[in-house]
Image: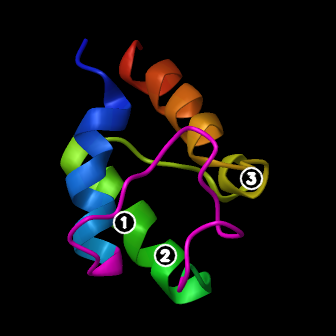
Amino acid sequence: MHDLLTLLQPIFRDIFDIEDLVVTRESSAATIDGWDSLVHINLVSAIEQEFHIRFALGELESLKNVGDMIDLMEKKLSR
């Protein structure tokens, strides 16, 4: 499987409209300017569409950073 972090970069850049945004596993709403609840919904929706997966609300609430999201995505994609 490709490195999910690499595949997520263009999605984050598009959603946040920051051409040179670099996302790491440690990135979170606290470290990226403009990451509010509306942007979060758009981001999750874009990831779900791109990777053909669905996140449950309870799963999303437990995520602390991009690394947690990648770990959850890997579980869903390996099913």
Q: Residues within 10 Å of mark 3 (few under 14, many from 20)?
A: few
Q: Position of residue 72 (x, y in %)?
A: 57, 31
Question: Which comes sooner in the sequence, label 3 or label 1?
Answer: 1
Q: Quadrant of the N terminus?
A: top left
Residue linked to disc 2:
41
Instruction: Residue at 66%, 49% (x, y): give it.
Output: 65
Q: In this view of the protein, which residue sits in the foreground, 27 or 71?
A: 27
Does the stretch in magenta take in 46?
no
The residue lying at 20 percent from left, 49 percent from top is 50
Q: Residue at x 50, y 42 (%)?
A: 24
- Tag 2 secondary structure: helix
Kindly identify which residue carries mark 1. Answer: 45
SS category of the residue bearing label 3: helix
Local crowd at mark 2 within 10 Å, few (<14), some, or many (≥20)? Answer: few
Kind of element beneath mark 1: helix
**Which residue: 61% across, 84% down?**
37
- Which residue is the site of mark 3? 58
Identify which amino acid the numbered label 1 is placed on. Ser
How does the figure colour the protein chain or chains? rainbow
- Say whether disc 3 or disc 2 marks the residue closer to the N-terminus: 2
